[in-house]
Amino acid sequence: MSELKWQKSSFSEGGAANCVELATCPAGHPHLRESEDPATVVQTSATALGALLRAVRDGAIGTAQG
């Protein structure tokens, strides 16, 4: 996965370690990982990622409180 260029959300404050990072491989498939566990990477489709983001935006999926 070294060819992936990971991006953190602009909502990550001060380089916080607990955020989701996103990358797109050369074939165009989105990849997600938790910055606290960068070795675990999930590959998905653009359609599924879009559905996830819409669900979060619309409040159908809440944020974890820890």
Image: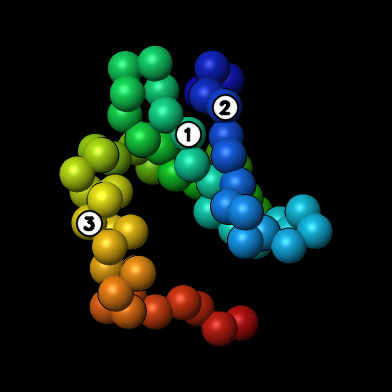
Q: Residues within 10 Å of mark 2 (few under 14, many from 20)?
A: few
Q: Does residue 37 appear in this view?
A: no
Left or right of 51? Residue 14 is: right
Q: CA distance from mark 2 to mark 3?
A: 22 Å
The reply to whether dot 2 and dot 3 touch (C-beta < 8 Å) is no
Q: Earlier in the sequence, mark 2 or mark 1?
A: 2
Residue at image location 60% in from the left, 47% down from the top: 8
Identify the element where label 2 is drawn.
Answer: loop
Residue 50 x/y as whole percent: 26, 51
Dot placed on the residue nearer the N-terminal end, 2 or 3: 2
Q: Are marks 2 and 1 in contact (CB under 8 Å)?
A: yes
| 24 up-or-down from 53: above or below | above
| Relative to 19, 40 lies left or right | left
- Residue type highlighted by circle 1: Ala
Which residue lies under the disc numbered 3?
51
In the image, residue 52 above or below residue 28: below
Q: Is 63 on the left-hand or right-hand side of 52?
A: right
Residue 49 image position (x, y, % from top left): 29, 48
- Res. 17 image quadrant: bottom right
Residue designated by label 2? 5
For disc 1, the marked residue is: 23
Residue flagged by tag 2: what amino acid is it? Lys
**Residue 54 place in picture, x, y as percent:** 27, 63
For the residues marked 2 and 1, what is the alpha-carbon distance in whole angstroms? 6 Å
Give residue 21's position: percent from left, percent from top: 54, 46
Q: How many marks can you see? A: 3
Sequence-earlier tag: 1 or 3: 1
Q: Quadrant of residue 51?
A: bottom left
Quadrant including the C terminus: bottom right
Kind of residue indicated by mark 3:
Ala
